[in-house]
Image (tube, rainbow, N blue to C red):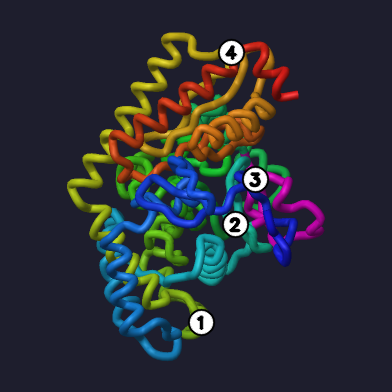
Amino acid sequence: MDNQGISEALGLIHPITLSHGKNAEVWDENQKRYIDFVGGIGVLNLGHCHPKIVEAIQKQAGLLTHYAFNAARHQPYITFMNELTEFIPMNQPLAGMFTNSGAEATENALKVARINTGRTGVIAFDGGFHGRTLATVSLNGKTAPYKDGLGPLPGPVFHVPYPSRDNGISSEVAQAALERLFQVEVDVKNIAAIIFEPVLGEGGFQLLDADFAKYLRKFCDQHGILMIADEIQSGFGRTGQAFAFPLLGIEPDLLLVAKSIAGGMPLGAVIAKKALMDKPVKGALGGTYSGNPIACAAGLATLEVLQSQEVKQSTAHYIEQIELRYQQWNAQGLTPWLGKLTGVGAMRGIEVNHEEQGPGTAVMAKILKRAREQGLLLMPSGKHKNIIRLLPPLTITAEVLEEGLNILETVLAETREASYFKESA
């Protein structure tokens, strides 16, 4: 593989080079076909090259490829922001800005929080992931590889445990940690925002405890702290509904979206209560490429397709099948390495864990390789990189889904054999 000129600091899960894709299938440069359960790490909820999104991109490319919205407005930005704020299930009037990525959305949310509260402190959670820029790296609830060698990071940022039925941490434990934080580490009056993923992504597809979410909402209201929900990966249908925060019975003050917002085009957004987004002075927010016309046109098409009956039906079928197959594997004792099914809806992870030997980090590496050889692309996640992160398109056909799950079943079953571990050595 020729990587000349490419930094070796870029990580790589699968040593293949892709040439093209269609819905839930991709082909490499040697024309080998793969079923894609990675989906660009959550970017392709509607699959590769959805025809309506491709059509929108092509049409807009013939009209206007770029204009900086800070210099002069363009219609795709205006129309998409209007549609997007109507689509988000929050009761108060909303306003927002487009960004180039999820990390950039997070950065701007921090600016909005600081300006509105006059404070600088942020609370984040263990296992969380919010980006790779300096400010977002400081929010991540994991040191390696994101913080290695960087020295002091922007802050102040404080971390507390993430409570979830999927990791065994209770709401009471997280509440106690928060209380200790304010007793020992920082004055609550210095905290501008609390940021969280309703469902951890890189952290292993763990759903936030709903009781804790409600407690957090009351706590933020009581102390004048802004609540930021990072739905960069869990949004746009990934959990089986538009966004995950309604599952928790709360509404955030600021919402971060990106990844599947525009069918693979680089786009993100910060959406918040209008009064919060209007507080910064004119010129404080923006960016040269933020809200590019082609990306916004793709976003409009994405929003239309996502709300179609066809996608709702295929999403429901996917949720039904992944839960059914996991139950079958568990009931038949497919492998002693089959751990919990984490997450919710269509955002599910399969834990690779042994009752006696613990997290299967090394086993996972072998699973990824074996699955790829058989034509299935998978992605690891979690603290120990032992959770299979399932991110196939919500538009995956029943036939391709069955084929992919059959490969996964075969690969998981192999982990029962003693020879499997000898070959792994």
Label 3 amino acid?
Gly
Residue 365: x %, y % from top left = 65, 32
Of the image marks 4 and 3, the number of the one nearer the N terminus: 3
**Residue type for callout 1:** Thr
Q: Nearer the viewer, mark 4 or mark 1?
A: 4
Give SS at disc 1: loop
User: Residue at coordinates 43% horizontally, 65% vertically from top-left?
Assistant: 265
Q: Nearer the viewer, mark 2 or mark 4?
A: 4
In this rendering, the answer to whether 33 lies above or below 324 is below
Label number found at residue 203:
none
**Residue identifier under label 3:** 141
- What distance separates the C-alpha of mark 3 from that of mark 2? 11 Å
Q: Position of residue 273 (x, y in %)?
A: 37, 64
Q: Range of the magenta residues?
A: 137-160
- Tag 2 and tag 1, C-beta contact below 8 Å: no
Q: Secondary structure at mark 3?
A: loop
Mark 4 sits on what residue?
A: 416
Question: Which residue matches tag 2?
Answer: 131
- Asked if one can make out residue 3 in the rendered structure from this viewpoint, the answer is yes
Q: Within 10 angstroms of label 2, few (less than 14), some, or many (20 or more) residues?
A: many
Q: Quadrant of residue 193?
A: bottom right
Q: Are marks 1 and 3 in contact (CB under 8 Å)?
A: no
User: Disc 2 residue type?
Assistant: Gly
Residue 288 has which mark?
A: 1
From the viewer's perspective, is residue 366 above or below residue 280?
above
For badge 4, the amino acid type reads: Arg
Q: In this orientation, which residue lies closer to the viewer: 367 or 315?
A: 367
- Whole-percent x and y of residue 284? 52, 80
Q: CA distance from mark 2 to mark 1?
A: 20 Å
